[in-house]
Amino acid sequence: MCRIISKNVRKSSQTSKVEKLATGFEVYIAVVFIIVGAILTRIAERYRFPYPIPLILLGLGLQFMIGQEALGEIPLDFLAQLTLAVVLFYAGLTMNIRETRLSIRSVMLLATLGVLLTSIIAGATISIFSPAGVIPLAVALLIGAILSPTDPAALFSVLESGGVRVKRKLFSILEGEAVFNDATAVILVITGFLPLVSSPGEQNWVIVIGQFAGSMGLGVVLGLAVAYGMGKLLLTFGGGSNTSILTAATPILAYGLGEVFSLLPIDLHPGALAAVFAGIFMANSRRIGLEVLPQKSMRGVMKNFSLVFELAIFTFIGFTLDFDWFFQGQNIVFIGVGLLVAILVIFIARPISVFLVTLTDSKMNMKERFFISWAGVKGVASAALGAIAIAGIADPNIGNGVNAIIFIVVLFSLVVQGITTPIIARKLNLIEEQDSAQEIASQRDATRHSLLFLVDQYTEGKVDSSIYTILKAELEEEIYTLEDELRRVISDRRSQLKMLEMREEIYREKLTYYQAEYEQGKIPDLIYEDQKLELQAEIDEIATLRRQLRSSRESDN
């Protein structure tokens, strides 16, 4: 009897160890996700393409390597809500409110009416052009709403790494639209279009409109309350790790408080907008009766916090995609449907809504309207909203279909729009010429000047040694970072110069070949003259670019 009990105890103990080991294994895999994702993000920025692309591919690759069972059931909808809270708060915290005010009318119209128009136009076109019976109208409208928000975060990283800086007005419109339309789309999806699919025929549109308006208004109020309360705590108890903890907790508190109202009979969802306005109010703390908050520290914390959540959501979206479902029966048709939806949303719904909404802006020309419509890259907001919506759809076939379409559209948008937008900005002449190396060098020189000033103050006995040590280390670290960035920019410039030199040699070699063939009578006059003019134009353009790069190098030195 005792032996049997002893065996059972040992067996139970071994089972417990296996369960603990399995749990630990899941944690290790998640950590590996984040580490590899961070490396891929850095590589993407270096080679100037949107960082979500390799993250999604990483998730797909890991799914084939270890299988979805390795991580158990992932609460993707909960992760998506946390991601939205953090990303929207960071967007509000970093938004340049002064620049946005210059284009506030266009920003607000794009973020409200633009989102609604994109949702309806996209939904209608998806329903009309999709194969009969594949996507019902209610599901099409839901997909349109999920794909209505833009995500210029990845786009801006590509523009910046490529040395492309769009005009201030366009940048402020794209930034402001992204901050507000993400929150608007969250409310629109959850209060308006998701119930159409999950509970068809039960909507009272008067109540839905009231819920939408109530969520918008309450979001602003909650954002103000959270910003004031957390701002007070930061000013009283901040400093060191406390600043990091309190800052990181703010978006989750704002979003969580907002979603508490969804448990009440009124069923409001102001969490997303509360997170946005908490960030905006904390970035402009003097306007709400507070002293200036430690903006640099807060933004540094939220930049890293936001990146971790984006790494997680994009990787897990690729990891959790149900490939087996794709190849069951007629489900493979959703690959084609997804590509069709991508074309309809990007080339029809978004341009129409942008052109209609910006008609009142007489100062905006057609090139700028086209660029704004093309730069509406789909990203983290659409991915997160898709995860939330799928969790609320009871029918697994509809849920898998929506998931597949959103996955394809987001990936298509990131590849096509994300990569081509910098090229289009240059072609349309919508960039501000600015020497990035000169800008970094001036920042470095200003920091060096500040360091010398600090040393003088310390030498004269005006600064305590402990304060001097801390400030000196901060300034030296800043100088080191700027010099490292300057070296990278100059190295890129040298690589560009070498490439241009080689390209010019190739064109000259082509020209020499055509000339030799022409002299031997192997090609007629017309072909020779056309090729000669075309190649000479290319050579002249390269020569101009080389002169510009050389003059930039001389100014760097």
Image (cartoon, rainbow, N blue to C red):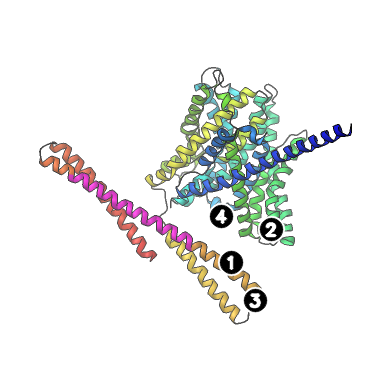
User: Residue drawn 56% across and 35% down?
Assistant: 65
Say whether disc 2 or disc 3 marks the residue closer to the N-terminus.
2
Say whether disc 4 or disc 3 marks the residue closer to the N-terminus.
4
Q: Amino acid at mark 1?
A: Glu
> Do the numbered discs 2 and 3 sit on residues whose CB atoms are within 8 Å?
no
Residue range corresponding to the magenta coloring:
483-512
| Tag of residue 474 | 1
Residue 221 seen by the camera: no
Counting from the top left corner in percent of width and height, residue 263 is at 77, 35
Say whether disc 1 or disc 2 marks the residue closer to the N-terminus.
2
Q: Is most of the magenta stretch helix, strand or loop?
A: helix
Q: Amino acid at mark 4?
A: Arg
Say whether disc 4 or disc 2 marks the residue closer to the N-terminus.
4
> Do the numbered discs 4 and 3 sit on residues whose CB atoms are within 8 Å?
no
Crowding at mark 4 (Cα within 10 Å: few <14, some 14-19, many 20+): few
Frontmost residue, 47 versus 35 = 35
> In the image, which is nearer the foreground, mark 1 or mark 2?
1
| Mark 2 to mark 3 CA distance (whole Å) | 24 Å
Q: Quadrant of the C terminus?
A: bottom left
